[in-house]
Image (cartoon, rainbow, N blue to C red):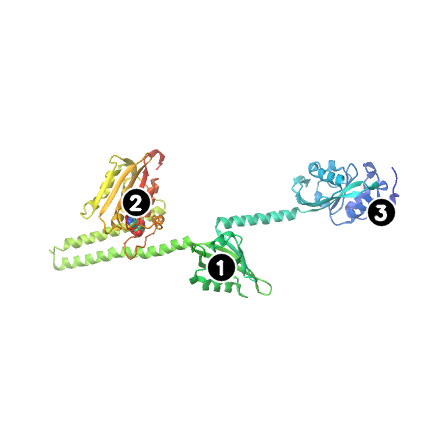
């Protein structure tokens, strides 16, 4: 082999370079395909001098066998108990069996075209630290001209980006988790730039404010979508959170009126303002939660308490009055023919009280899942006739019961009686100007169906879906009907427990037909 340099000259290029410099100088290069350093071309020596003395991770494949060199900066990428120091002077193919199919085409591309490659954050798992590790790299392969102007080797300048990629992935995962939580909680999120008074928000918040997904939100526009009665309070809360020296906390409940469709939504806004070193607000962000339902249930509960106390007090007051009169009659005029009248009145007040208390107890049983069923075989028409006895006895009402007299079902007699009595009593109560009530019993292959029809005040279409909600009562323009708004709720729970359905067809002024179904096949019903 022809000497290109004296050995001393050649080794001058290999000076420095820390551990890898020393290993490179000590290596028995004569035993490799590229021979000893004094036979190496100038370009290889110069490239090695650059590689060994650089603090940037570098690697070189040289000659047809792709014999390897690398520097101290590259060395940690090989891990402990891995390829180092064996990789020095090794043939590429022998060193990297696990990734050779990935990197060989890149090397060939450089060798054949002379074009450099560029890969960013590429996953190239390598064997190090006694295991195959997922390692990410940003790297470029480029040619190094050797003897006679041909490409003599491939230089790899690379950077391991595993930490960066893992950090990015962890941040991305945390972001996805947060997004998932926000999505699951159906929350709106907002982030206000106090410098511009514009804010970004997720699609949900935009839809609440009547904006399209790509619209930017202007604080003034957003505030104009807040219900007028809340606007001043919300503006004051925003200003107070962003004021210099404040704790930055923002917590306010208000109503948004969608400017397009005018729907109202009660929202709870929670946020935090952040301040710079001078104490000036630099960011203000938080969440918005739709609490409309919560507020309306709560509101109904409050209404319910006041209605319940009123409803309980009315029969009690009447009972007390009857008892006082009876007391007087007993004291003064023992034989008075008025006594039976006031005893009846007292009894009727007591019955009303018992009904009300029964309803309250039923609701708490339902709430605690304790509405047990005791099923027996029941003739449905007989049950209807029995439970409507009280209506028949009153000459004022014309009760018509029709349908299948031989229809038997398995059900809890007392509970189904309760449902029918409730529907019939409502048919009386909400039809003050009519006296006809029609009850029909029918069935198809799967279900029995009982319908109770009245010709009373009816219910408007938008109220119908709520009738079976707990505490729900329709405001009937000026007419005061007594009640707790629990009867239909209890009926629907009893029917559901029997695996049936309940519903209503109604027209304002024309009357209503409340109906429920019960399954005929007891095998499908595990109660
Ligand atoms: P309550 O009668 O104690 O208010 P319900 O749960 O039985 O409670 O009924 C809920 C609401 O449904 C009533 O307040 C009433 O507005 C409406 N409603 C029930 N039955 C009828 C009916 N037959 N006709 C018209 N409205 C009815």
Which residue is labeled 3 in the image? 12
Mark 2 CB within 8 Å of ligand 1 = yes
Q: Quadrant of residue 384?
A: top left
The residue under the point 80% across, 46% down is 47
The Cα atoms of the two marked residues, 2 and 3, are separated by 103 Å
Q: Is residue 2 visible?
A: yes
Instruction: Please indicate, yes or no, whether residue 360 appears anywhere in the rendered image.
Output: no
Q: Nearer the viewer, residue 379 or 400?
A: 400
What is the secondary structure assignment of the residue under circle 1? Answer: helix
Give whichever of discs 3 and 1 has the lower sequence position: 3
Quarter of the rendering occupied by the N terminus: top right
- Measure how far apart labels 3 and 1 are at the Cα level: 73 Å
Q: Quadrant of the C terminus?
A: top left
Question: Separation of disc 2 and disc 1 at Cα?
Answer: 44 Å
In this view, the residue in front, 413 or 217, is 217
Say left or right for 4 vs 100: right
Viewer-nearest of labels 3 and 1? 1
**Residue drawn 61% across and 49% down?**
168
Question: Callout 3: few (<14), some (14-19), or many (20+) C-alpha neighbours within 10 Å?
Answer: few
From the viewer's perspective, is 316 left or right of 365? left
| Residue ID for mark 2 | 514
Sequence-first tag of 2 and 1: 1
Query: Which residue carries the number 1 mark?
Result: 222
Q: How many marks?
A: 3
As drawn, is 40 to the left or to the right of 268?
A: right
Q: Residue furthest left?
A: 335
Choose the circle earlier in sequence order: 2 or 3.
3
Give x and y (percent) for residue 167: 62, 49
């Amino acid at each position: 082999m022809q000497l290109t340099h004296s050995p001393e000259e050649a080794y001058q290029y290999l000076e420095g370079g820390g551990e890898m410099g020393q290993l490179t100088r000590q290596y028995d290069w004569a035993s490799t395909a590229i021979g000893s350093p004094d036979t190496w071309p100038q370009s290889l020596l110069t490239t090695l001098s650059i590689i060994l003395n650089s603090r940037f991770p570098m690697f070189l494949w040289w000659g047809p066998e792709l014999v390897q060199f690398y520097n101290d900066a590259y060395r940690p990428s090989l891990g402990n108990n891995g390829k180092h120091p064996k990789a020095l002077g090794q043939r590429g193919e022998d060193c990297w069996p696990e990734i050779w199919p990935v990197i060989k085409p890149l090397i060939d591309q450089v060798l054949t075209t002379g074009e450099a490659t560029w890969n960013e954050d590429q996953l190239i798992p390598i064997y190090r630290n006694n295991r195959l590790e997922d390692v990410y790299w940003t790297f470029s392969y480029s040619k190094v001209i050797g003897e006679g102007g041909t490409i003599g080797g491939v230089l790899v300048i690379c950077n391991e980006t595993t930490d960066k990629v893992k950090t990015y992935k962890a941040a991305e995962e945390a972001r996805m988790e947060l997004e998932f939580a926000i999505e699951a909680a159906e929350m709106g999120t907002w982030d206000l730039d106090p410098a511009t008074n514009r804010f970004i928000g997720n699609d949900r918040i935009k839809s609440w404010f009547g904006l399209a997904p790509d619209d930017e939100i202007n604080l003034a526009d957003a505030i104009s979508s807040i219900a007028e009665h809340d606007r001043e309070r919300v503006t004051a809360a925003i200003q107070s959170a962003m004021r210099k020296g404040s704790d930055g906390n923002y917590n306010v409940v208000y109503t948004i009126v969608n400017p397009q469709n005018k729907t109202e939504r009660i929202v709870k806004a929670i946020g935090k303002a952040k301040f710079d070193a001078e104490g000036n607000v630099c960011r203000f962000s938080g969440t918005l939660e739709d609490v409309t339902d919560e507020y309306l249930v709560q509101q109904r509960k409050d209404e319910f308490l006041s209605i319940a106390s009123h409803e309980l007090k009315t029969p009690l007051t009447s009972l007390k009055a009857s008892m006082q009169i009876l007391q007087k009659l007993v004291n003064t005029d023992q034989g008075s023919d008025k006594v039976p009248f006031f005893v009846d009145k007292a009894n009727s007040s007591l019955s009303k009280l018992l009904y009300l208390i029964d309803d309250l107890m039923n609701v708490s049983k339902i709430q605690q899942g304790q509405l047990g069923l005791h099923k027996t075989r029941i003739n449905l028409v007989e049950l209807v006739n029995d439970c409507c006895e009280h209506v028949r006895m009153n000459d004022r009402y014309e009760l018509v019961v029709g349908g299948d007299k031989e229809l038997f079902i398995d059900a809890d007699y007392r509970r189904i009686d309760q449902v029918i009595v409730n529907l019939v009593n409502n048919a009386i109560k909400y039809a003050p100007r009519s006296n006809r009530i029609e009850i029909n019993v029918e069935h198809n292959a799967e279900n029995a169906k009982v319908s109770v029809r009245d010709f009373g005040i009816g219910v408007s279409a938008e109220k119908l879906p709520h009738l079976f909600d707990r505490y729900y009562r329709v405001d009937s323009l000026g007419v005061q009907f007594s009640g707790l708004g629990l009867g239909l709720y209890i009926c629907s729970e009893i029917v559901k427990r029997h695996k049936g359905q309940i519903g209503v067809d109604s027209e304002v002024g024309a009357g209503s037909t409340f109906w429920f179904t019960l399954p005929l096949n007891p095998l499908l019903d595990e109660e």
